[in-house]
Image (tube, rainbow, N blue to C red):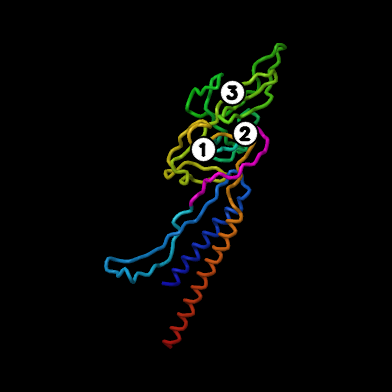
Amino acid sequence: MSFYTSLNGLKNAQTDLGVISQNIANAETTGFKKSRTEFADIVVGSAFTNPKLVVGIGAAVESISQNFALGPIEQTGSALDLAINGDGFFTTKNVVTQETLYTRNGSLTVDGGGFIGDGSNNRLQVFPTDAAGAITSQTPVDAQIPGSNGIDANGNPIEFAGITVGDDGAVTASYADGSNLIIGKVALASFIAPQGLKQIGSSNWIASGLSGAATYGQPSTGQYGSLLSGALERSNVDIAEELVGLITAQRNFQANAKAIDTATQISQTVIQLRT
């Protein structure tokens, strides 16, 4: 029995090492959220078992939980680098699969068609607005910047000159003649249980049955948080904390290996007694 108990301990330590390694590897990944391995003891008994004589049979991985604490904010100066000062998520939609993704990585770019996205076929979702910036629909749409804003007196198109994003999520395009056009307000998502979101890589998550469906709102309202333009949220991994966890997991692995070695020696001693 002790062999299998310690073997479970070895497997659990390996899982813990894997999670810590993943955290350390993504210490510089924008918008990454660290995870933690949680264990539970295993005890087996029956109605006729004396509770004072129950011996546990090891531990099991209960969950690998994600920590969505806010990471450090780094100033970049780029208008399309956005950070969320709150609990919301940016919403993007994949051009190919039409799958809705959620992320804390606000490093955005503009493609040749004027669409704002993450550079990986995922387009930022915004609430459509009227000319005054009032939201006209609660259904998010792709954020797209018109290449021109009409025709000037000489019959030439008025070309796009720049873009700004306000703390309320208003995405404003500026043009060469000094005119401005609000193309929408950034749609932020929140979840009743964000720890239930499913990781799919590239700092993206998708909703699951554990997270519940997304609810949408604009920045600077409710729990969604305000936007910081010209800044990015770095990984919330604390290297010092992870290194301490790495040492602890390594010692745990060594201790379980030693327990197997001790059980082997006892077994050999018993066998020698019988012979």
**Element assignment for label 2:** strand
Q: Nearer the viewer, mark 3 or mark 2?
A: 2
Q: Residue at x 44, y 68 (%)?
A: 5
Q: Earlier in the sequence, mark 2 or mark 1?
A: 1
How many marks the image carries: the answer is 3
Query: In this figure, which residue is indicated by the disc labeled 2?
Result: 229
Q: Residue at x 57, y 27 (%)?
A: 170
In the rendered structure, are the residues bearing label 3 and label 1 in contact, judged by CB atoms less than 8 Å apart? Answer: no
Instruction: Please check the rendered image and state whether residue 74 is part of the magenta-colored stretch, yes or no.
Output: yes
Q: CA distance from mark 2 to mark 1?
A: 15 Å
Q: Earlier in the sequence, mark 3 or mark 1?
A: 1
Mark 3 is on which residue type? Ile
Q: Pointer 2: residues within 10 angstroms few (<14), some, or many (20+)? A: many
**Element assignment for label 3:** strand
Query: In this figure, which residue is indicated by the disc labeled 1?
Result: 88
Q: Residue at x 64, y 41 (%)?
A: 74
Mark 1 is on which residue type? Gly
Residue 272 occupies quadrant = bottom left
Q: Which mark is residue 210?
A: none
Mark 2 is on which residue type? Ser
Image coords of residue 103 (percent x, y): 55, 40
Image coords of residue 245 (percent x, y): 56, 59
Q: Which residues are magenta?
A: 65-79
Q: Which mark is residue 182?
A: 3
- Given residues 114 and 104, the one toward you in this image is 104
Q: Pointer 1: residues within 10 angstroms few (<14), some, or many (20+)? A: many
Q: CA distance from mark 3 to mark 1?
A: 22 Å
Q: Residue at x 55, y 66 (%)?
A: 251
**Element assignment for label 1:** loop
Q: Pointer 3: residues within 10 angstroms few (<14), some, or many (20+)? A: many
